[in-house]
Amino acid sequence: MAEFDVMIKGGTVFDGRRNPRFSGDVAVKDGRIAALGRLRASDAKRVIDASGLMVAPGFVDMHTHYDSQLFWDPYCSPSGWHGITSVVIGNCGFGFAPVRPEGRDRAMLSMTRNEAVPLACMQQGMPWDWVTFPEFLDSVDRTPKSVNVLSFVPISPLMVWVMGLERAKAGELPTDAEHAEMCRVLSEAMDAGASGVSAQRMGEESRQRDYDGTPMVSDLMHDETMLALADVLADRNDGVIQYTYIDFSVLYGDTEGTVKRVRPHIEAVARRSGRPTIVGGANEADPAWLAACRQQALSIYGMGTVNTIVRHPRIGVIADNPQAFDISLKWCAATAGTHETIRENLANPKVRASMRSELPQIEDFLGKMETWVIAGGTKSAFEEMPLGQIAPTMRIDDLLDAFCEINLADDLRTKWAFPTPRGEFMADTLETHKAIAASPYMIPGISDGGAHTKTSVGADYSTLYLTQYVRTHGWHDLEEAHWRLSGLPAHCAGIHDRGVIAEGAAADIVVYDFENLEVTARETVHDYPGNEWRLVDHGKGYRNVLVNGEITIEDDVQTDIASGRLLRNGRAT
């Protein structure tokens, strides 16, 4: 009788702890790694020949928005196609629990602009068989999954649950009693298996706005609220804080806001909680500041945006993704509201004048307007042409007028491609990426998987990291890479028995061909509920991916085995 269920034989093994690679075998039994070294093939029911291949712990995607998609897509794709074996949901303070039945429609609407999740997909794809956060986790537990799922408690629905939507949206300071109730609900959620709390805080000028163009609930939260929740984690000696806190004065050349307000507050939160605190994006996750935090014994980590190292034009479709224009509050106001309201706005000369006044800051992020290219439209005759060439053909002198008229003719469905000079999240240059790689406190990622699906693909970051940071530029060796992709994010997320190749660890394993690893060409697919479309790409070179000892990917193809688990407090039940 075979001793092991699966044996991965003859590969180059990386343990996810930065120890030197070794050539050997990995044996799996009952969903766990049972033995390492030189083993007999005859002792396993199935043998995977890993000669010439790399064997590594499954990758941990710490920053996703699969909170709705996981209910209709077991692979949380594209993440599950790129060696990801565990995803963390509930990021940025956005999510769907706790939510009372009468608040469900509003909760779904809140995700349609800031994370660009189609409303019809959520309406058709989510079971909504929960009210409280523990009930939400039970629903995730019941749902077939081909990746593991860990969840933060998102702060926005928590604030609405306690304060009511109107007061929470108004940015009122919660009362002592309300803070106490938020702390109780957070603790209850963590008792049920949540891994901590998350928040987005971007102020009145937030770039990630609610469906109606107003700031999100947590954008206007007070320091006292996050500090109160940090105390919960301190009292429990458990959990993680994911904090997206950006002072948008930085975008206009003023760094004082970040230095004087943002960083001291994040440091105070990390100090009060005593727990890992994850910040994301280029502004607040500055490598020099992260190093300074270490000198204060603060466990503050940054997340670096990897996917912008390969240039893809940013895409904007007013009907589907007006968030692309939210760097300007006047453009945001013009593209908020119902479909008909937006049409009226774009046809209104006064609204156009308002948009024109903030065109410079739009162009600072999306490139000069004359370079905007029509990448698709339902009626447009100008596909693949830049606006600078289209306007004279239309006999329109003003580019903004031409832009508005084209969108109106296409019923707001024109697909615009922008040659973004600064790149998404301002991480466009090799020097920026090299600095991210150089910092030992930066986690590669910010995939945003499940969000912005019609405009970008960030869930390919793991494959891009291996092919660009390691293979092309040589910034890291593979020992460091697999620590960053697996061991480090597992530690920071509070995942206790994954992210490493070690006896007794969960058998989340990736077997891949390093020299031939690549990201496939981007494509448009109609595979969301309601036949909604999205952009995807695949990982090529993944011979096998195992999740809890079962093979979920074989030769880059799904096996449709749902072996993923809900990770309550970082462990599978």
Image (spheres, rainbow, N blue to C red):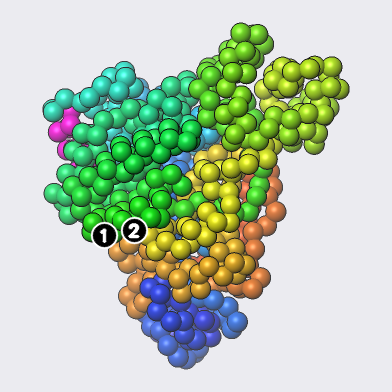
**Quadrant housing the C terminus:** bottom left
Q: Give the residue type that dot 2 points to.
A: Ala
Q: Give the residue type that dot 1 points to.
A: Gln
> Quick one: 262 or 496, which is closer to the camera?
262
Residue 429 in view in this figure: yes
Residue under the point 62% across and 67% down: 472
Q: Is residue 342 left or right of residue 294?
A: right
Q: Say few, some or many: other residues with alpha carbon within 10 Å of mark 1 (under 14 / 14 to 19 / 20 or more).
A: few
Q: Position of residue 377 (x, y in %)?
A: 74, 29
Q: Position of residue 486 (x, y in %)?
A: 42, 65
- Secondary structure, mark 2, is helix
Q: Residue furthest right?
A: 393
Q: Is residue 521 left or right of residue 32?
A: right
Residue identifier under label 1? 295
Residue 206, label in figure: none
Residue under the point 33% across and 27% down: 220
- Secondary structure, mark 1, is helix
Q: Position of residue 250 (x, y in %)?
A: 44, 37
Residue identifier under label 2? 291
Q: Is residue 221 above or below residue 494?
A: above
Q: Main secondary structure of the magenta part?
A: helix
Q: Position of residue 241 (x, y in %)?
A: 29, 47
Q: Is residue 306 left or right of residue 443?
A: right
